[in-house]
Image: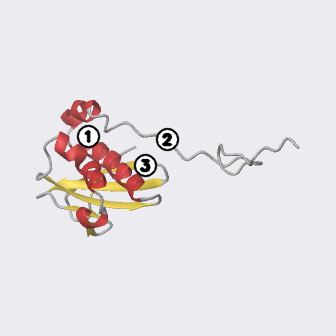
Amino acid sequence: MAVAKKAANGKNDKLGTGRRKTAVARVRIREGSGTILINNRPYEEYFPQEQDRKNVLAALVKTDRVKAVDVICTVNGGGLTGQAGAVMLGLARALKLYDPTLEPALRDGSLLTRDGRMKERKKYGHKGARKSFQFSKR
């Protein structure tokens, strides 16, 4: 799962990995002033939709750490909503390592639960996962 590592610059960074659909996010948090960078861009610029921005901030808001930690995140795969969900899970896992007393608050908000829903595969003889071609009796 998430692993705590000593960063090259001497700061004690906490790492968390989050996944959602096909998106994977590697989140690093450290003491700071509240800067959130996703793929070297501010999170407001990376996620244009308000819902996605709220998902990213959910763990920080729930634990009152919005202005206490800096977040650096690398995310790839999937779409923007899946990436926002992956960042949310990775950030919650990193916060749990950063301060273990935050775990109950994160659990209550179900921020440490991985969303296992994936796209269902296409079946042979069908148009998609469930949709079929039109049936003709004659």
Answer with left or right where residue 43 lies relative to residue 123. Answer: left
Disc number lying in front (3 or 2): 2
Q: Distance between the residues labelled 3 and 2?
A: 11 Å
Reading the chain from its start, which is encountered first: label 2 or label 1? 1
Q: Where is residue 47 in the image (x, y as percent from the top left)?
A: 30, 61
Q: Mark 3 points at which residue?
A: 19
Residue shown at the point (38%, 60%) measured from the top left: 75
Q: How far apart are marks 3 and 1 (CA)?
A: 16 Å
Looking at the image, which residue sits at the far bottom? 40
The kind of residue tagged 3 is: Arg
Answer with left or right where residue 114 lies relative to residue 70. Answer: right
Reading the chain from its start, which is encountered first: label 3 or label 2? 3
Residue shown at the point (52%, 45%) measured from the top left: 118
Name the quadrant of the C terminus.
top right
Q: Mark 2 points at which residue?
A: 117
Instruction: Name the foreground residue: 4 vs 135.
Output: 135
Answer with left or right where residue 54 lies relative to residue 113. Answer: left
Q: Name the residue under label 1.
A: 96
Reading the chain from its start, which is encountered first: label 3 or label 1? 3
How many other residues sit within 10 Å of disc 3, few (<14), some (14-19) or many (≥20)? many
Residue shown at the point (64%, 47%) measured from the top left: 121
| Circle 1 SS class | helix
The kind of residue tagged 2 is: Arg
The kind of residue tagged 1 is: Lys
Q: Position of residue 125 (x, y in %)?
A: 77, 48
Instruction: Name the foreground residue: 34 vs 127.
Output: 127
| Contact flag, marks 2 and 1 (Cβ < 8 Å) | no
Name the quadrant of the N terminus.
top left
